[in-house]
Amino acid sequence: MKTKTKIKQSFDKGSSSYESNCDIQRLICHQLVNFFFERKEKITLSKDIKGLDLGAGNGILSFELLKFIKFEKLHLIDFSDKMLDLAKKKIKQSFVTYEVKDFENLNEIEKFNFIFSNMSLHWSKNFNVLLKKLLEKISNNTLLFFSIPNSIYFEKKEPFYNFDNLMNKFPDIKNLLNQLDKNKYFLESKNITFKENFNNLFSFFYKLRSIGANVNTENKKKSLIRLRKQKTKLSVFYNINFVLIKKL
Ligand SMILES: C[S@@+](CC[C@H](N)C(=O)[O-])C[C@H]1O[C@@H](n2cnc3c(N)ncnc32)[C@H](O)[C@@H]1O
């Protein structure tokens, strides 16, 4: 099965327990909203805000932004229809529309001037290509802001067996942002590390699986069964990048 199909199916499946297990995604979402509003003075918001939520999932980021921003229209896209159903339950305003779509095959992106995403873009096949395409296609004065993991690491009392194999690699966002032409784009970014405690390594992976975020994108062989033997308590650190870009 293709990796993308696996990711879609995994989020379809995770949708039933996403709301009760997405506490880290929710925390990150609130920090992304803070990150954006802390910088609001530096950017001028257009009067007719046409929003686009990429990988909207349960719609949490749109839901939070709707509390503060007057949208003319808002479009939520996700390739998991089941995840998008969660958003439909949450957001019912008439100017809000939904579409089951892969964010790597977007067209008419220039119609939107306020584009955002929480914890979704790293699931793309090639994040560098996606970001470059987005930046090229969006119209001038469009805002793009998102959160994306940089790394996930562990603090543990005893060493784990061959652990590296179990985690996906995240995009090298710092390098990518360094290459951005500052004459064409206004850029602000920030890193925040979030900590979550688990009773053992298996509970961490079990939680990832419960929200559908456990697909191994590098097709490495992994067996969670042997993790059951790891009984040590551990802290998981999620290092997240917050990025705001405006095309000048
Ligand atoms: C971790 S969830 C985040 C959902 C939501 N934004 C939040 O903050 O909780 C990742 C979402 O990205 C979606 N996704 C992953 N790859 C996608 C793609 N190529 N096109 C559209 N949606 C995608 C998944 O279906 C899932 O709903």
Image: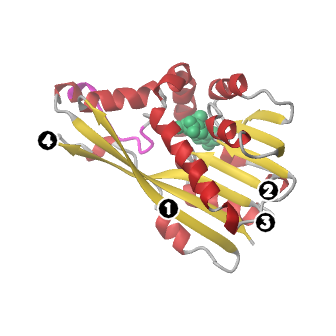
Would you name the residue on which mark 4 appears? Answer: 157
Q: Residues within 10 Å of mark 3 (few under 14, many from 20)?
A: some
* Amino acid under disc 3: Asn
Furthest toward the top, the residue is 16
Dominant secondary structure, magenta: loop
- The residue where tag 3 is placed is 141
Place of residue 78 in the rendered image (x, y in percent of width and height, measured from the top left): 67, 36
Residue under numbered circle 2: 113
Give the magenta part as a residue range.
216-226
Residue at the image point whose x is 49% and y is 31% from the top: 22
Nearer the observer: mark 2 or 1; the answer is: 1
* Residue kind at label 1, given as amino acid type: Lys
Residue 190: give its label. Answer: 1
Q: Position of residue 104 (x, y in %)?
A: 66, 48
Asked if the residue at tag 3 contacts the one at tag 1, i.e. Cβ–Cβ closer than 8 Å, the answer is no
Q: Quadrant of residue 30?
A: top right
